[in-house]
Each structure stands twice: as structure tokens, then as C-alpha cells.
Amino acid sequence: MKPRKKEGAIVSDPYFDLSRRDDSAILKLGYNPKILIVDDEPTNIRVLTEALSQDYDLIVATSAVEAMGILEQDDKPHLILLDIMMPGTDGLEMCRNLKARRDLQHVPVIFITALSDSSSEEKGFEAGAVDYIRKPIHLPAVRARVRTHISLSGMLDHITALNQTLKEQLEQLDNSDQPNSNLFERVFMATSEGIILLDANDEIIAVNAAFSRITGYSEKDVLHDSYAHLSRDIDTQLSLDSIRTYLTAHDHWSGELHSRRKTGELYPELRTISTIRSNNNEITHYVIVFNDISSVKETERRLEELRWRDPVTGLSNRALFLSQLGTVLKFCNRGNVSTAVLVVDINNFRYINETYGFKCGDEIIREFAGRLRHAVLSDDSIARLSGDEFGIVLAPKQWAIDDAYRVVLALYDRIQNSLTQPFQQEGSPDLRLEITVGAALYPTESSDSPSSALQHAETAHRSAKAANRPIAIFEDSMSKKIRHQLQIESELNQALEQDQLVLYAQPQLSPDRVMCGLEILIRWNHPERGLLGPGEFIPHSESSRQIVKIERWVLHKTLEKMRELHRTNPTLRCAVNISAKHFAEDDFVGTVKSAVTNSGFPAELLTLELTESVSANDLNTVVEKMEAIQSLGCVFSLDDFGTGYSSLSRLQRLPISEVKIDRSFVLSAPDEPMNANIVEMVVRIGETMGVRVVAEGVETQAHADFLASRHPQVYLQGYFFGIPQPIDVFLNAPGGDVLPE
């Protein structure tokens, strides 16, 4: 690369090369700047290559030894991104080795680190780094910092060359026995860069006009003042002592600082410092050349935003999303990891724009984007692809493809939950949004290019729209297990629409063996497979939001049937199972209140059965919901007691009126002392808490005799006293306490 003249100084242009061939001048457009990434963490390498591969030529080394081998080649990088914590030679030592070599000391080094304390930063700057990138790595920050340092390289070349010119002239003056009273006029040329001349004691002996223009300090303000006093407000962990130490060893330092003007304003600055030595090698002066790079920083920031960001939401745009997706897919192909790509849009969004205007539409998009951000995990990527269409790519994890499917469903649930609150915009009524989601799972045997992956998710999205379904998965990316899951979900939707679900009930008996209640159960009268028990479809529904729809159907249908049964048996209770997912719904309390109030069935005869898993959520919120429903008169039962992992200290805070001993303990209690002891323990816990205890799984005479002799105070439920039957059987049975045959 040949140097070229600029403003009286020799500078190098990193983007152009003017060379002669056959006596003709050829201007070669610069290649992509080259960056050397030195890191032993695959995740960091993935993130950095994702951020930089489109604009820069990247070289990756996983150790300092490998990196130094690369640097021995003639073609040096424009920038080095260096991890501090590496096995063997760490980043600090490698940086010191670089700065000790004249052929490499000019290459800027940016450290990558999770350390944030000031002493660690100071060590890094002492070693010669120009900047830090902190973990976890934030993509826009990486691109902005790298672009800034690459862009500043030309400016740094210029002020370094100017500094060198001044240094040479000062050394000539110092060693020529000429008086230097007119030093400033004889050495400081007209230049736009700020210049400060210090003596060996760091006292300011000269500044130029550009110094005053940039900093706001006049020559009178600073002349004969200490440089340390002028620099006391520099906003950096880099101490003057560390710079002086570096200068003593190398005679030159350059880097980026933040300085303060006389007004107190903070601004970014590119600065070089050189030492002037006498013939006997003693330091006589320091030359400081600096420039305000505020405009460069602002320009880079704006370019970064325009190129990669959606202006309305601040999210990644389609171009950046495809780049991120490409990196994730490559990572999936290299390791045993999986991911998913989702396309999400707002149903009937055009209606909002047409009815309330584009300004309202933009506000809705902005608010929707914010809710999406809260729904996705911190390491997932999200982008606005176009209009009301958003893209999400999950951070790759060591999932099986079926696990990735469940993660997609969990994310869909979180997005749905984020939309329960209406969108409030000035000048328009509260708006409730619904979404459609298409997803594709990776890796697959089919094409794994970013554009194909996004296209597959968009295909699934269109399929969901056409079928009027809230979510669809691209078929080629689905395993046999997932296809079966989706088939069950589709058929369950039809079951709800076509009234294929049937209520069953099983009697519950008081300690004196009189029927006092019914546990409501469910069966599916499948048109092809016949009558299916809950084990055939409830687990599938619990992995999606269908369990919420099913349980709400059960609640309304139960209250309708029990209202009829209440006429002939006014004391008969009923118990309805509620899943943790349903209970966690924001509108759960309102749904139960509405159903009970409108049913005409006494609330005090309704028991809602929960499992211990409900207490794993925010306990205060759980208790608040239970108390709100309790205020209606309803009570709660804790089902399958003893099979969960919740502590008794958490469970005792729940306002329950009943615990149910899990059937697995009751079934073996007559023959196994361990389970008999567990049954006794649960009964005693119930007595201590002052709640009713129900024993499930009473299926034989032996079970009934065991409970009668050992625990005559418990309530009973099981096949020995009555099998589950359609609830209409109980409606048609004689009144009173008679059990159906």
C-alpha cells in the first residue's frame, strides 16, 4: 500500500491502493476490511460472525498461538477482536506481544470480556487495547464499535503521521542548540487537529488554535498548567500513569478517549501521544495530537440504524434477520442443536389502518413489538419483516426436534398471554389483537438456507391462515410424533365444535359411605376410534392452549348439568379439575366468576381441583386468585397430594379446603408399609391443616377395609364404590343418596 500526501502529512488510506503497473496508474477499490477474531468460545464466534460477516473478511483463531501464526503472514488485519480469558496465552499477554512488535503494534485491538471491574479495564488498556466489547455480546454494539474503529483508521493514520512530523521537527530543534522560545510558531503548522505540547514534567507549554476550538479552553486557561489537571475529567478507566508507562516503553501511544470540553460536555476523541527524547535518550517533551470524532460516531450510528433497523420499532429489519438466521442455521448443522423460525402477524391489521389511520397503526405496531420482545427469551432474535409481519428465530439449543416443537408452543402461549390486555390508543377504542403464527423447525434434510427457512415458516403461516388456525408448523420439518400431536390438536378442535366431548362423573362418598359429591371427568366420543379416555388426548391438549378451551367447556357444561341435578339432590357437590396452565390465564378469575354467576348452581357446592404444580408459579398471585374465587363461595382441593415437589411451607399458604391422597399410594397401602405410612402422613397433614381428606383409588374390598380400620374419617373415591359414568346417568338415577348401578 502506497502512502499519499494529505495536508502536509504522510497518511495511508486503508481502502484504496494506488500502484503502478506498466507505467499506468491503477486505482484499486479497497477490499473488505479484514478482522481477526481470536476466541475459544463457539457461541461468541457465532455471534461475532453473524454481526460482521457481511461487511468484513473474517479470520477466526481459537487460541493466541494460532492467531500469532496467522499474523506472521504478510497480509495484516485491520482490526483484532480478542477474548481475554483463553487457555494458554490469554488475551492480555497476546496484546502485549502484539504491541511490542513494530510490524503489529499499529493494529487496533478490541477486547471481548465478561469482566466489568475498573482494574480489569485498566489492565486491558495498559496492554494496548483501544476498546472493549462486553459479554453478553450485543450485535448492534459490536457492529457500531467495529465500524467506528475501522472508519477511524484513516483518521488515526493521519494524526499519527502529523504527530510523527511534529516529533521529528522538535527533536531537530532540541538537539540543534537553537533557542526554542518561538517553538510554537516554528513547529505548529496550520492544522484542524488539536495539538498540545508538554515538557518532561507534563506541564503544558503550547497549544494551537484547533485545541481551543475543540475544547473551549483558551491558551491562557491552560498554559503552564498540569496536563493531569486538564485531563482530570476524562471519562475513561485509562489512567495517565498507565499511558506514561506505555510511552516510556514504546515512545508512542494512540487510542480513543472521552474528554470534556470547558462547558462540561463529554465528547469522543481520537488521540496520539509521542515522546521527544534528547541525544542522551532523556524525555524532553510530549506531543499530543487529537481530533473530535463526534460526527464520525453519530454518522456511524445513523448508518447502522438505517441499514439494519426498522425505523418504527427499532427491531432488526428483514436483511439483518436473514443474516442472523443464516448464522443460526450453520451453527445447527455443525452441532447437535435445534432451532425454530417463526412468522407472526396481526389478524386483520389492515382494518386498523383503514379505520383509525396509519398513525394509530404505527403505534399499534410499536406496542405489539414491545410485547413480542417481552415474550421471547433474551437470546432469541426478533425482527419486523414487513407491515404487520414479524420474524423470530430461537437461539439454538441442544433440543431434540420434538423439544423444539414444544418450545415453539410455549412461546406461542407467552405471545398470546401478552395480548390479553387490550391495546389503548388515543382517539380509538381499546383494541384486542389476535395473531397467526407459522413455524419451521431446524435442522432438516431439506434446504437450510436462510431464505428457504423463512419461506417455510411463511408457508406454514399461510397454511394456518387458510385453515383458520392460530398456529401451524411446516410439515417437512415435523417428526412423526409432532405430526401425531398436530393431528390430535386438529381433531380436538373439531371435537369442541361438533360436541364430541362427553362429561363423565365418579361418585365421592362421605366417611359413612353416603354419596356426597361427583368428580367430573371427560371422555372423547371419537367418530373413528370410539370412546377415548382422558389419557388419549389430555396430555396433547396440555402442550398447547387447547387445555384451556377444553376445561372451560367442561366448567360451563358441568354447571349446566349440576343445576339440573341440584333440583333432586340439593346437597350434592361437584369437583372440576383445573390445570396449572388454565389457572395461570390472566382472565381465569373472571371466567370462573362469570360461569358460576350465570349458571344458577350454588357456588359453595363447586370444588376446583388443582395440583401442587400451581404453587410453582408466583405464590402471591396464586393465593390472590384463589381468594378471589373463594369469595364467591367456591372451594379448592389439592389433587394428587404427595406426588409433587412443592414444599409444605408453600402449600400451607394456599387457601384449600381439601387434599386428595394420590391413588398410587392407596392402591398399595394394604400390602406395603411404606405407602401405608405415606397415607397416614397425608391424613395427619390434612387434620393439622383443618381440611377434608379424600382417598382416591379405592378399588377393592381390601382398600375399603384398610381405610375403614385405619382412617375412618377420610372421604372415599374409587371403582369399588362407583365407576365413572356419563353424568346423565346420575341425572336419571333416583333422588337422594342412591348410587347408580
Image (spheres, rainbow, N blue to C red):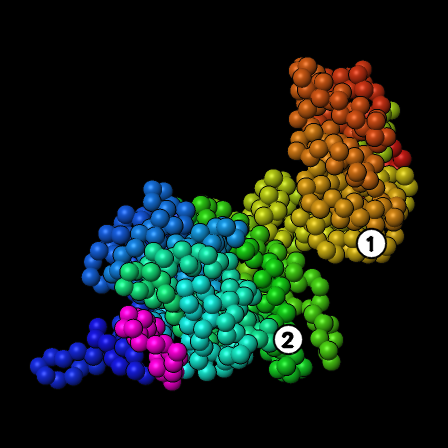
- Along the line of sight, which residue is nearer the eye, 257 or 365? 257
x, y (%) of residue 105?
A: 30, 60
Residue 421 appears in the figure: yes
Q: Which mark is residue 593?
A: 1
Mark 1 nearby-residue class (10 Å; few <14, some 14–19, many ≥20): some
x, y (%) of residue 246?
A: 38, 57
On screen, residue 115 versus residue 702, left or right, reads left
- The residue shown at (52%, 70%) is 225
Q: Residue 363 carries which label?
A: 2
- Along the line of sight, which residue is nearer the eye, 285 or 380? 285
Residue 2 falls in which quadrant of the image?
bottom left
At mark 2, the secondary structure is helix
Q: What stretch is highlighted in magenta?
A: 162-191
Using the numbered discs, state the Cα–Cα distance from disc 1 to disc 2 in whole angstroms.
Answer: 34 Å
Q: Mark 1 vs mark 2: give the one in front.
A: 2
- Along the line of sight, which residue is nearer the eye, 643 or 502? 643
Residue 371 falls in which quadrant of the image?
bottom right
On screen, residue 166 versus residue 75, left or right, reads right
Which kind of residue does numbered mark 2 sit on?
Answer: Glu
Q: Is residue 175 magenta?
A: yes
